[in-house]
Image: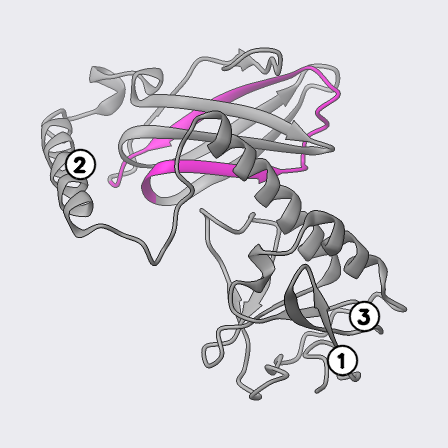
Amino acid sequence: MVCPNCSEKMNLDVMDGQTILHCPNCGGTFFEENGINRISFATAQRLADEKKVYEISTSDKLCPKDQTILAPIRSEESVPPDVTLFGCSTCHGLFAYPNDLVIFKKAQAVKIDYFKIWSIPLPSIKSIAVLSVFLFVSLVSLITYLYWQKQNISSYIQAQDLIKNLYLTTSNRYLFISFKTLIPLRSRIIFTVTSTNETVNKVVSGELTTFHQLTTADVNIEDEIYYQIVLRDEKGRETRTEMKRIDFTKSQ
């Protein structure tokens, strides 16, 4: 079996109880379905370090098991915006570049810690209760209906009133932000670094949603950083929070 990235022969191995295909040349790794979720960060780091060259091919990537063209996976809830994973629609396996694998596992660990701290059950795509979904949709529909009676969200309700469970934490150089909104909204966050007066504008949720999260390494967490969250409804109307300093010693 050959590597989807560099076409070199891949090695079959078992790590953390998961069967993987690993390329010793470029460091790319192919996981069976859900296998990437079951390996440790230490294993991901070890796999990333086992490469001879840094090579990223721009050609179509083929599944090493069945030759299906691998497609990039984009998911705001599970994959950080600066990470690209490639999925196979036939065997449901995943291919990851070495650096992307490390960033993904680090962000995943931060997210798991967040859910543990807030005692929130980890989401499972295959374990959705029909009744719970019905009640949730009904509640969101009611809130949304009442909300859209207001002609302008900035005139009737402030951004801070729409946000709850705001959580910020760091892991090495990565900053993790998550929060919920009372109704489905798009969101972005503006960081301002006081030492350089630099402004960084990042999209948190590009689609209408009530759960918003972002993992980024675009700001130096050692600096004094201020942030402002901007919320936007489906008609493009915006409201934003006041500028606030990030303080990791307490909940925001």
Q: Amino acid at mark 3?
A: Cys
Within-10-Å neighbours for mark 3: few <14, some 14–19, many 20+: many
The residue beneath circle 2 is: 140
Mark 1–mark 2 Cα distance, whole angstroms, equals: 48 Å
Q: Report the coloring of the rendering.
A: one colour
Element type at marker 1? loop
Residue 108 percent across, percent down from the top left: 58, 45
**Span of residues in magenta:** 208-234
Mark 2–mark 3 Cα distance, whole angstroms, equals: 46 Å
Which is nearer the N-term, disc 1 or disc 2? 1
Within-10-Å neighbours for mark 1: few <14, some 14–19, many 20+: many
Q: Is label 1 in contact with label 3 (beta carbons under 8 Å)?
A: no
- At horizontal 49% and vertical 24% (from top left) the residue drawn is 167
Q: Is residue 224 magenta?
A: yes
The residue beneath circle 1 is: 10
Residue 117 percent across, percent down from the top left: 50, 26
Position of the N terminus by quadrant:
bottom right
Element type at marker 3? loop
Determine which quarter of the picture holds residue 97. Answer: bottom right
- At horizontal 79% and vertical 67% (from top left) the residue drawn is 27
Taken as a whole, is the magenta stretch helix, strand or loop? strand
Q: Amino acid at mark 2?
A: Val
The residue beneath circle 3 is: 26
Determine which quarter of the picture holds residue 89. Answer: bottom left
